[in-house]
Amino acid sequence: LFAAYSNCNLDKVKAALADKDTITVVQCAPAVRVGIAEDFGGELGTVAARKMAAALRKIGFDRVYDTNFEADLTIMEEGTELIKRVTEGGTLPMFTSCCPAWVSYLERNYPELKEHLSTCKSPQQMGSIFKTYGAEIDQFDPAKMFVVSVMPCTCKEFECNREEMNSSGYQDVDVAITTRELAYLIKDMDIDFNALPDEDFDQPLGLYSGAGTIFGVTGGVMEAAIRTGYELITGKPIPAVDVSAVRGSDIFRTATLQVGDIELKVGIVTGLKNVAPVLEALKAGKLDLHFIEVMTCPVGCVSGGGQPKLLLDSERDAAYQARTKGTYAHDAELPIRKSHENPAIKKIYDEYLLEPNGEKSHHLLHTKYCTGENNFKK
Ligand code: SF4
């Protein structure tokens, strides 16, 4: 069944690429760039961002964009939402909403806690900017655009098909494929991945900071939010860009950070089975935190179900560690490491969105959560 579903998505991608009237846009999640090389004999955790951009261009996509840009956008929106909830009053703790499996779990099992979720869409779904802002930049007809996401995740296809994910006036993201499926497509088209030159993603929606790339690891969303939140609240540079207090792999870890006058208490949960005790503690009034990151997969998206398959169970931990290390190394080598310093982020707010959490952002980048089954397309 999975093979049929999977081939069906690749067939849709191939049909869009073959249709001369269709404008094809692709975006890649942070974790894909530290996984895909493994399917071409690369060492575990190899960072292949720029080779992947070259492969996508060779496949024939008209625009090669990057979900890392939308991760930076998520930080602007989610960070602003958190600051408002903390300083002006709002439901706390606020939970991250980047992981569709976690969001769906909460909707179905703890609907009474849904106000705790950030209203931000995930970075993938902030891809609503492709058929709006992106279409305006290139003077494309959004009705002719076909947006493909490459994700480390087997839940992202469910997310892009949620019925509320159409704030561009069209389905915002048409198809999500996995890292493995992209590797299959590259091989199927006889592209020699290892011989490709390094290329950049297209601008401006492919420009990203190190904060955007660490979304791929557990604690990464939290660290990215702290880098920006600290500077927005205090107006001063954060003392250390590497926020080691939120790194690690413990299934539930907490930290307290002094941010100006605020003693910010944060938590990170990794692995869905570990979240129920946290939610029960919240319901019992025993959880004193402002912000909690939840990711379903063992060490975040680098360990997602759509990443290259590991033949031996014993390889798994080594692969997860190597992909995590590759992610932090990529962050450290990037010239910009904070979302609010990304010039393409400044540009989109200057000329299109105007302000984080503003009217346009609320329409395109935020959503409402459902209860029960009504988040599936009929
Ligand atoms: Fe998908 Fe896993 Fe990442 Fe959640 S943590 S978005 S389920 S890959």
Image: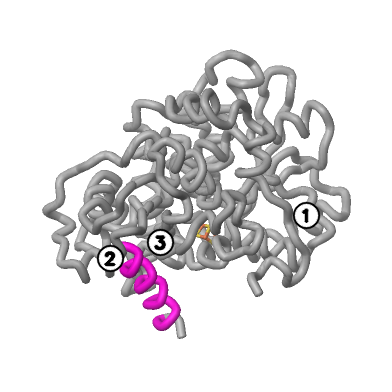
Dot 3 alpha-carbon crowd within 10 angstroms: few under 14, some 14 to 19, many 20 or more: few
Q: Earlier in the sequence, mark 1 or mark 2?
A: 2
Q: Earlier in the sequence, mark 3 or mark 2?
A: 2
Residue 79: quarter of image:
top right
65 over 73 or under it: above or below: below
Q: Residue at x 45, y 64 (%)?
A: 175
97 left or right of 187? right
- Towards the viewer: 171 or 182: 171
**Which residue carries the number 1 mark?**
114
User: Which residue is drawn at the image coordinates 82% and 42% (left, top)?
Assistant: 91
Residue of label 2: 18
Residue at point 58%, 40% (across, down): 222
Q: Amino acid at mark 1?
A: Lys
Q: What is the residue that sits farthest to the left in this orientation? A: 195
* Callout 3–callout 2 Cβ contact below 8 Å: no
- Image coordinates of residue 373 in percent, x first then y, are 73, 72
What colouring style does the render use? one colour
Label 3 residue near ligand 1, CB within 8 Å: no
Residue 214 in picture, x, y percent from top left: 46, 42
Q: Quadrant of the C terminus?
A: bottom right
Q: Answer few, some or many: residues within 10 Å of disc 1's Cα (few below 14, many 20 plus, some between 14 and 19).
A: many
Please name the amino acid that badge 2 sits on: Ala
Which residue: 22% across, 42% down? Answer: 199
